Image (cartoon, rainbow, N blue to C red):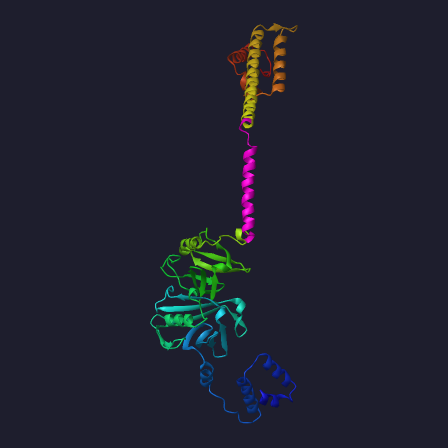
Amino acid sequence: MDELSKLVHSCATGDKLLTALRAADATNDLADLIVAVINELGGHPAPALPAASELCRAEFKDALCVFDSLMFLNPRGKQQLALFPDKCVIRTAKADISVPWSAIRHVAIIDSIPKDTKGKVLLVLNLASEAKVLNGKAVLTAIVVQTTAQAQLDVAHPQGGGRLQGAAAVVMCQALGAVPGGVDPTCFVSPDAQYFQSADRAAGVSAFVKARQGFLYPLPAAFCFLEAPALYLPHAAIRSVELMRAGGSSATFDLVLHLRAGGVQEFGMVPREELAGITEYIRKCRLAVGSAESSDEERGPAAAAAAAESDDSDDDSQDEDFNPQSSSSDEDEEAQQQQQQQQRAGSSGSGKRKRAASGEDSGAAPAKNSGGEEEQGGGDNDDEEEDDDDDEGEGSSEEEDSSDDDGSVELVSEDDFSTAALTSMIAEESSGSGRGKRQRL
C-alpha cells in the first residue's frame, strides 16, 4: 500500500483511490497488483507476483478441511470450498465468498431429480437474508453444489485425527456437521415420500419462475426451487398458499406463496396431474390456504377468536328471538284470510248465477211497445245493470270472447256459464228480437 501511495500521490485521483482501497479493507496483494499495472504502463518491468495457486494455498493453509474442484450451480462454476472454525469460504474466479456458520439455516440433500438419468445429487445451503452474504453486489440466499451418487471424496476430518471418505454428498454433509460450532445436525433435510411424491414418483415437479423453467421440490418443512433462480422458502416464512387456475380446464395451474415478509412468490405452469399431490402436501403440512387478505393468520389469532365468538353470539341471539307460537299464529291468520277471499268469490259467483236464472224467467214473456215491436222487460235490463255493477265492484274472473252472427263481440264471465243462462241466450237468438248485440249476462 505504501508503494502505491508513492506512485499515485501526485495524481488528482490518487487520494480517492487510496481512500477507496482502505474503506474496502483491501489486501496488500491488491495494492501490489495495481502497482504492477502502473509500472507496466510506465515502461517499468512488473515485479513478479506469486501464482494464484500459491495464493490459495497460503490462504487455505489454516483451513480445517478443503474441497477442491466442486461443481457449483450457484454461484456457477468449479470452485474451492474451505471450512474454517468460524466460517466457510468459497473461492470463485473473481473473489472469495465468506459465509459465517450462523448464516446457514438449512442444508437440503436432493437425490431424486425428475427426468434425471445420471444420478445427480444436489446440496442446497439455505442462507439467512439478513446475513447479507454477497457475491459481488448480489445477496446470496442459497448456495447449490452439484455432484453425483457415484462421485467419491477423501478429505481431512475437520476435527483432525482421521479422514472422511465415501460418497461426495455424504462426506460434505459429514464435514459441515463435524466443524465445532458449524451446521447443527437438525438443519439437514431431504425429500420425504410420505409428504410428497410426484406423479412420476420423483421428489419434484416441473414449474416456472417468471420465464425460467426448473423443478419445485416440496420438502417436509420448505419449498425449494432449482436450478435457477435457486430458492429455498421455509414454511415458517409463508403466510398462506393459493392455487390459481386449479378449477379450470387448463393443463396447468399456478402455486402462489404469500410471504410473511410481504410480497408473493409464484410457481407457474405446474402440470395438472400434480394437483392432487400438491393439495395433499398442503394439507399434511397444515399450510393456510387462500390469499393473504382472507387468511386468519393475517388478522392474528386474537382477531380470529373474536370473530368466532361474535358468530356464536349472533347465532344465540337469533335463537332467542325465535318464537314458534308467534310464527304459527301468523300462518293461521294468513290461512283465514285466504279462506275468506275464497268464500267471497264463491258467493259472488252463485249470486250471478241466480240473477241470470231470474233474467231467463222475465225474458220468457216479452212485451210489445207502442210501435208493435217486442222488447225485453224492464226487469231484465235492471238485472243486467246490476250484474255490471257487481262485476265492477268485486272484479270478475277471467273472461272469454264470444261473437254473434253479425260479427259483434261480447265478453262473458266464466261464472255466468250456467245451463239457465245458455238456454236464455238461445231463446233470445231464436226469438229474433232484433238486438244487434247481446248484453253481458
Q: Position of residue 127 (x, y in %)?
A: 49, 68
User: Which sits in the foreground, 398 or 109?
Assistant: 109
Magenta stretch contains residue 45: no
Q: Position of residue 414 (x, y in %)?
A: 54, 19
Q: Which residue is most to the bottom?
A: 44
Magenta stretch contains residue 320: yes
Asked if residue 399 shows in the view, the reply is no
Locate the C terminus by quadrant: top right
Give the extent of the magenta segment: 298-325
Q: Is residue 268 left or right of residue 5?
A: left
How would you classify the magenta stretch by its main secondary structure? helix
Locate the N terminus by quadrant: bottom right
Marker count (numbered): 0
Q: Position of residue 37 (x, y in %)?
A: 55, 88
Quarter-wise, where is residue 349 in the image? top right
Q: Position of residue 175 (x, y in %)?
A: 40, 72
Looking at the picture, does residue 346 appear above or below residue 44?
A: above
Q: Is residue 352 left or right of residue 152?
A: right
User: Which sits in the foreground, 419 or 403?
Assistant: 419
Quarter-wise, where is residue 25 in the image? bottom right
User: Which sits in the foreground, 122 or 131?
Assistant: 131
Looking at the picture, does residue 258 appear above or below residue 164?
A: above
**Which residue is found at the position 61% from the left and 11% from the top?**
383
User: Which sits in the foreground, 125 or 430?
Assistant: 125
Q: Is residue 142 left or right of residue 395?
A: left
Quarter-wise, where is residue 292 in the image? bottom right
Asked if residue 280 shows in the view, the reply is yes
**Which residue is found at the position 51% from the left and 67% from the top?**
128
Looking at the picture, does residue 142 appear above or below residue 305?
A: below
